[in-house]
Structure formats: C-alpha cells, structure tokens
Amino acid sequence: MEKSIKIKSINPIKIFGVSDRYLKLVELELSVSIIYRNDLIKLNGKLENVDKAVKVLNEMIEILNKKGSINLAKIKDLIIIIKSENIKNINYFSDPKFNLYKGRKGKISPRTQGQVKAVNIIKENDLSLITGPAGTGKTFLSIVYAMALLDNNEVDKIILCRPAVEAGENLGFLPGDLKEKVDPYLTPLYESLEKILPKNKLEDLFLNNIIEIVPLAYMRGRTLENSFMILDEAQNSTDKQMKMFLTRLGIGSRAVITGDITQVDLKKNKYSGLIQAINILKGIHGIGFYEFNKEDVVRHTLVKSIIEAYDEKK
C-alpha cells in the first residue's frame, strides 16, 4: 500500500532529522519504507503500518508548525502511542469530542484507546476502580476529569488521597513533623495538579479547601457530599482502609480508585484492599472496572520495555 504526504511550509530536514535519523526510526518501528521527492513524502508497506506512519508524520508536522522543533524522544513517544491505537477509528490528538479539560498548557485528551475506555468507565459510574502499570495515566486522567466536573459545577470539592505507608517505610520512623512526614507520599498528586492548573488558581483552590490532598488515614470519620474522591496507589491500602474509604461516599459524590496490583508494598501479613475490592465488588451496579496494560504506557519509551522485562521474570 502506498500513501503520500505533501509538505511545503516545513524544512524537510526538521522532519527527517540529521542524516535522516527521524525518518529511519519511523521506518524501523513501523515497518514501512519512506521516500521523499519534490515536496512529497511517499510511504509503502502494509496498510495498517502505513496508516500509522502517516499519523506519526502528521503529528510531527503539527508539532513543528506549533513549536518549530521536535526531538527524538518525542518521536519515540508518538510512535509508541500511535502503535497502540486502532487508527481507523479515532484521532485522539485532534478530535474535539475527546477533549477532557483545558489545562494551563492547552487541551488535555486521552492519548490511547485504553485511556478513552478508562475515561468512559469513570464517566458512567459513581465508583470506578482503574488498575494497571505505571505510566498509563490512571491518576492524571482521574484528576483531569475531576477538574472538568468542578469547573462545570457538577461537584463542589475534590479530595485526593494516598496511603501514607509505602515501600516499607512507616511514618513513625521518619523525621520531622506531620506535614514533613506525609508530603513525600503526596508529592505525585501535587505534581499532577501543577501540570493541569496555573499556580494562582491552584493556590486559590487549596486555600478555600476546594481541593484537598490528604493521607488516606485522614478520611476516617468523614462523609463527603457532592465531592469527587480519588484514592491513588490503592494497592497499598489494607482491607480495612479500603472499606473505610468506600464508605465515605455521600450524596452526590463519586470516587475513583487507582493502583497497580503488581506493586503491593504492604507487609506480608497485610492483604491489599484494592485486590480484595476488585474481587468482591464486581457485579454491583454503579461500580466500573478497567485494567490498563503495557500498551497504554505514555511515559518515556523505556518504561514499556522495563515493564516487559519484569513481566518476563515472573
């Protein structure tokens, strides 16, 4: 199958890279051949591979038109993302119906089919359990969707929480006061919000307690109405903690629970509340489940390879 892309406004070297290194990467990763003549890029290969290569090149051109430059790491990320998509159905990068929220750096949309499915699960259920490996966007997408609901006045408050005991460390043995002790565990949640919101808006939301970030233990005794609750790293919650969190739901509230069941850091005599919840809550109306896989990883290109390497050792 042969397809063509016409380019006029961009220097071909910016698309192909020095010594055609970008071009060679696309050819190698997508099993296509690419020839450039007279402002025309011609691609040959199997239809599915050619379609994906065309999409990679079009995304590269779009980035170059907007930013003026592109690097090898970005192209590798584009290839990974586009290789995981069903190209015939969806263009996640440009289709407005997939825009979730306008963040401080522009519109935020799902980047893989898996992310689209996960968002749909969250939209359709009052409680969603989203699992999968690191780098699949479980927590980030949940926060983005929560912000969209907040801006639309569909919820009044967002509460983000994490278990405060991870990787074998106990708060009682860490130095400093309570805030100093819990902040290292909650930092990833702060970082996700900082990617989405301007600093002044984020500070205002914190100041007015519209967004809270707290250790899971601090949810005990609360009943939250018209709120969006997110429990991150839930694989490190105990069965009792999970039940406590689930029963915080008040009228008009929704919750998303995220985690990676292959990364449980609890002591051997403790059972993961996330694993238990997945096993006992299936079949209840209003509760949705979705599991990402390594094809949905949207971090550095090495992350997918690292996950595969560890999976092979099991």
Image (cartoon, helix red, strand yellow):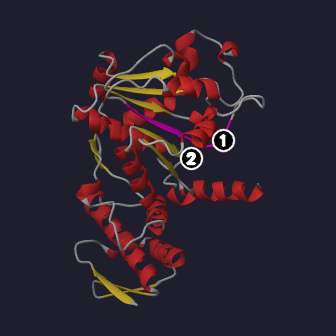
Closer to the camera in the image, 243 or 198: 243
Which of 104 and 314 lies nearest the eye of the viewer? 314
Is residue 47 within the magenta segment? no
Residue at x-position 60% and y-position 10%: 176
The x and y percentages for residue 290 are 49, 50
Vertical order, 218 against 25 (above or below): above
Asked whether residue 264 appears in the rendered view, the answer is yes
Residue at 41% from the left image edge and 48% from the top image edge: 121
Q: Quadrant of residue 185?
A: top right
Disc 2 to disc 1, C-alpha distance: 9 Å
In terms of sequence position, does the residue under pointer 2 or pointer 1 come before the other?
Answer: 2
Instruction: Say which element carries label 1.
Output: loop
**Span shown in magenta:** 254-264
**CB under 8 Å between callouts 2 and 1?**
yes
Query: Residue 267 location in percent, x, y?
Result: 75, 29
Q: Which residue is mark 1?
A: 263
**Quarter holding the C terminus?**
bottom right
Q: Residues within 10 Å of mark 1 (few under 14, many from 20)?
A: some
36 relative to 180, above or below: below
Residue at 58% of width from left, 42% of height from top?
278
Q: Amino acid at mark 1?
A: Gln
Local packing at callout 2 (Cα closer than 10 Å; few below 14, some 14-19, many 20+) is many
Q: Which residue is mark 2?
A: 134
Q: Quadrant of the N terminus?
A: bottom left
Residue at the bottom extreme of this rendering: 1
Tell me: residue 281, above or below residue 202.
below
- Where residue 260 appears, as percent x and y from the top left, is 60, 43
Up-down relation of residue 108 to residue 19 (above or below): above
Q: Residue at x 56, y 35 (%)?
A: 233
Residue 59, by quadrant, is bottom left
